[in-house]
Image: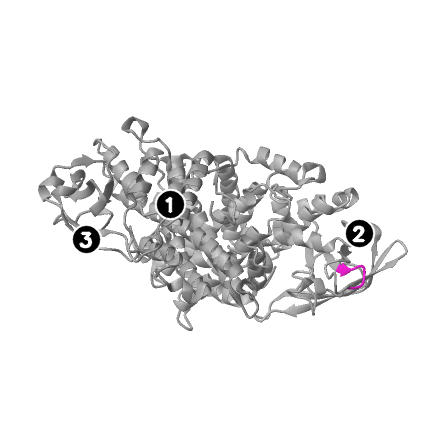
Amino acid sequence: MSDAAENDRRAAGFAHLAEPSTADPDVVAMLTELFEDYRATRPAPGATVDLDRGLWARLEHLGLTRLTGSEASGGSGAGWLEAAALLGLSAAAGAPVPVAEHDVLGGWLLEAAQLPNDGGIRTVCRPDPSGVALNVTWARDASRIVALWEDRDEWRVADVPLDRVGLEEGRNLAGEPSDTVEFDLLDLEDGVVVAHGIGEQFHHRGALARCAQVVGAMERVLEVVLAHVRDRVQFGRPIGRFQAVQHLVSDIAAETALARAATDAAVARAAASDWQDRGMLFAVGVAKSCVGHGASVVVRNAHQVLGAIGTTLEHELHTLTKPMLARRSEYGSVHEWDETLTTLATSAGRDRLWTLVTTGRAKSADRADR
Amino acid sequence: MATRLVPPGVRELPALTDLRLEVRAFLAEQVRAGVFVPHVDTWLTRWDREFTRELGRRGWLGMVIPTEYGGQGRTYLERFVVTEELLVVGAPVAAHWIAERQIGPSLLRYGTEEQKRAFLPRISSGDVVFGIGMSEPDSGSDLASVRTRADKVEGGWRVTGTKVWTSGAHEADAFFALCRTTPLDPEHRHAGLSQVIVDLHDPDVHIRPILSMGGDHHFNEVHLDGVFIPDDRVLGEVGDGWRQVGSELAYERSGPERVLSTFQLLATAAQAMCDGGLPTDAGLGRHVARVAGLHHLSFSVVAAPLKKKPADVPAALVKLLGTTTEGDVADFVDLLTATGWVEDEELYTLLHAAILQRPGFTLRGGTNEILRGVVARGLGMR
């Protein structure tokens, strides 16, 4: 049988068995072009990273800053497949813009609380009972900060103007703005009560958004590494000819592929169920764990292959590796997520572990539960 | 778009899940009835021809073989989920594994009409058992260096040489032997190789056991002492053997058995942590995550449209990651376990077997070092 005939047979035979989950190709093409253009014109790497308002304006003009917002609220009405593409490609370009905070987290919280969204830059945080939130990325650049606050047994969402919070500037490992924000408790108490699952879902959304960003950066790291091993000549040949180097690079590719598969699976599950699938906790945990541990290998091997030049300020590599390490620890450390998965796995036990792996839930073997 | 080595993800739909649940229910019933005891690495170490035939009767063998050749005419995705279910429960599947995984697809691709009719119906019923005849005493990773020789004679070929690591040859009926039909040309090492279908019951075939380090007999040395192979038992084209084994290896490398050989150990360890028999350790979650990620990865590889070339790079990636992970599972449980620990005999039995099988995981079907080379070639480094 020819490959073409076999492909036709497969496509026909597979249609009722599995469906591809891929982002709208037009959106992906637009994003690819936009961020390739950005990468060609962006400023040289520095020790600190500041919001690029020019890029933000371009994103806004294209409807990308409110990509997943409902069209009724002024958003573009896209789903998580497209959002994940935006997060990945912007991270691959090292683009200093709050795409995760502003849209898939902040915009979503505002919609959940039925609060108006004027389109001004938002970031998000979960202040503690005293009203303080640590490590709030891009806080200084936001017009308002969307706070998700646990008030006794209720979750409240407050959209607080920047001039009403105390702000102590800081930076994360990546050199990005990562500030301490102190709210007036009265502002938080004025927040809108939202559905109970919002608090948990916020954590899952944040974790998966970070996964999408880290995987995008991993894929760019692989490109940077491949370009280097072709160009860099030692002992009279490109270093990519050495088996030891090939093996370091192959392991980057392998961990990147696994992190991509785990992240895509969670994104697909989120997109198909609008986050209502009861397997989301497991799916996000799998992504967070594969991405987090994979980042260890990718960062270590990439810096090993790039040699000393890869450790310099002028080189692109740290604009990828530092955010990867900063982001993998946000919305739950890798260890915390491993512990969550461990709890799910021990609860499933021997006879239900495979059900957990395939569905994200230990008890779903009966049809009625699907 | 950034470098992407694996196909995009796909979601399993209910029709596929129904098949999964049907197989799962049957297997649970078989375990309850004591037909088999779940074990690790059963696709190499657990033979049960009657169980294999029962799978054939239920339509879970020959799944991708067209019905006109006695198969089920189903899809690779359906075969994939049946395979996963058999592996995770540790069922005795070694007898049909090689035929189902690579011999059937290779016969479909390269076999003559007569060969298809001779073998595919019996593969689909589980009545004919195949082995692999690639490696030799002096040819492991460097497969093109095989020295088994086929000399042209009237009506066929005389094949002389020695194949090794032939799992189950002492139980099997036939294998494809990779041999030289023209002498080695050092400038064109991949030329002049051919595959022939050898009847392992032939009196000129001599099979000797190679015992594994635990004392078990899975592997064999197969000596071909001038075995006559009629012309109609050459597979595909004479001289095309290298390309044919390449596509056979792509089938061999991408399956879920490259991830799930120790799944019963992982699941039993989860149970032991729940029961207090093992300390609860976050490593469990980490390994479960990798298994789940690999489940998605290999599913997407199976579902992807065929390209002109075999899917050797995605297959190599799945095998590289998967065999490392399934071996790490054995080591993870071992690190949590004290010497002489017998509180849970079942866990100990699985762990003991997994530790002994582990070195083979990252060797068989292409070592991890060879696979990294395949990936490097796919990335343009070689």
Mark 3 belongs to which subunit? A
Q: Are marks 1 and 2 in contact (CB under 8 Å)?
A: no
- Residue B52's disc is none
- Of labels 1 and 3, earlier in sequence is 1
**Tags 1 and 3 on a common chain:** yes
Give the Cα distance between marks 1 and 3. Answer: 24 Å
User: Residue A340: x and y, percent?
Assistant: 32, 53
Q: Which residue is mark 2?
A: B233
Give the Cα distance between marks 2 and 3. Answer: 77 Å
Q: Nearer the viewer, mark 2 or mark 3?
A: 3
Q: State the residue lying farthest toward the bottom.
A: B339
Q: Which residues are magenta?
A: B179-184
Task: Name the one closer to the observer, A218 or A315.
Answer: A315
At label 2, the amino acid type is Arg
Q: Which residue is mark 1?
A: A90
Could one spot residue A141 in this view of the protein? yes
Q: Are marks 2 and 3 in contact (CB under 8 Å)?
A: no
Mark 2 belongs to which subunit? B
Prevailing SS of the magenta stretch? loop
Quadrant location of the C terminus of chain B? bottom right
User: Residue B42: x and y, percent?
Assistant: 56, 57
User: Residue B184: x and y, percent?
Assistant: 77, 64
Q: Residues within 10 Å of mark 3 (few under 14, many from 20)?
A: some
| Picture quadrant of residue A111 | top left
**SS class, disc 3:** loop
